Amino acid sequence: MTDVREVFVAGLRDAYAMEKQAKDMMESQANRLQDYPEMKSRAAEHVRETEMQLDRLRQCLEMIGESPSTIKELGTRAMAAIQSMASAVSTDEPIKETLSGYAFEHFEIASYRSLIELAKQLGELRMVPLLEESLREEQKMAGWVDDHIESITQEFTAKASASA
């Protein structure tokens, strides 16, 4: 049987690596999407939130005498670079970025919900508010993406039609 603490530590390390990946993807996105100021602005805002999430995850790991996994972090950051390159060469980059962002935000939400439950099971209640704050930020970002899927698609098609 797998030890719950081991699962929790692995989950915290995974979340830390996930947030590093998210930060890299959003920074790259913000640099490339000059023609979409609202997306660029929201990505930059979420980069700042992600930096705070990384700090909170680091705090959680330190509370239990652990640290982030360099190997996991390097792997997910490489994935972020590949994903950014793939999006950058697509003809409908803003739409692709929106769709992948929607999926990624929901993955992050599920990760934080699981971590909160594991923290409660382990009696690590001091971590719950930190994880809940990150969860709220991810839910807010997911809501923003959800609210803007149609308008980003419309903006893209209008710009594509105008340049054709």
Image (spheres, grey):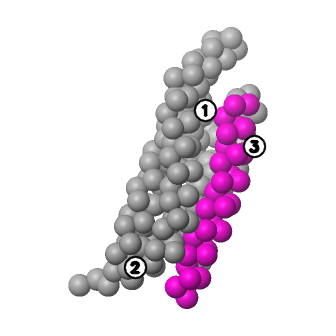
Report, in whole angstroms, how far the alpha carbon at label 1 lies from the one at label 3. Answer: 12 Å
Residue 63 magenta-highlighted: yes
Q: Position of residue 15 (x, y in %)?
A: 51, 66
Residue at image mark 3: 31
- Classify mark 3: residues with Cα within 10 Å, few (<14), some (14-19) or many (20+): few
State which region is magenta. Answer: 37-66
- Classify mark 1: residues with Cα within 10 Å, few (<14), some (14-19) or many (20+): many
Q: Which element is circle 3 on?
A: helix
Question: As shown in the figure, which amino acid type bears the numbered disc 2?
Answer: Gly
Q: Are marks 3 and 2 in contact (CB under 8 Å)?
A: no
Above or below 53: residue 159: above
Residue 139 magenta-highlighted: no
Q: In which quadrant will I find the N terminus?
A: bottom left
Which residue is at the front of the view, 20 or 9? 9
Q: In which quadrant will I find the C terminus?
A: top right
Residue at image mark 1: 94
Question: As shown in the figure, which amino acid type bears the numbered disc 1?
Answer: Pro
Of circles 1 and 2, the one toward us is 2
* Residue at (45% x, 61% y) in the render: 112
In the visual, does 155 lie left or right of 99?
right
Q: Position of residue 141 (x, y in %)?
A: 56, 43
Residue 157 in view here = yes
- Which is nearer the N-term, disc 3 or disc 2? 3
Of circles 3 and 2, the one toward us is 2
Predominant secondary structure in magenta? helix
* Residue at (70% x, 46% y) in the render: 45
Q: Position of residue 17 (x, y in %)?
A: 55, 67
Which residue is at the front of the view, 132 or 78? 132
Report, in whole angstroms, how far the alpha carbon at label 3 lies from the one at label 2. Answer: 42 Å
Q: Position of residue 71 (x, y in %)?
A: 55, 77
Residue at image mark 2: 123
- Which is nearer the N-term, disc 1 or disc 2? 1
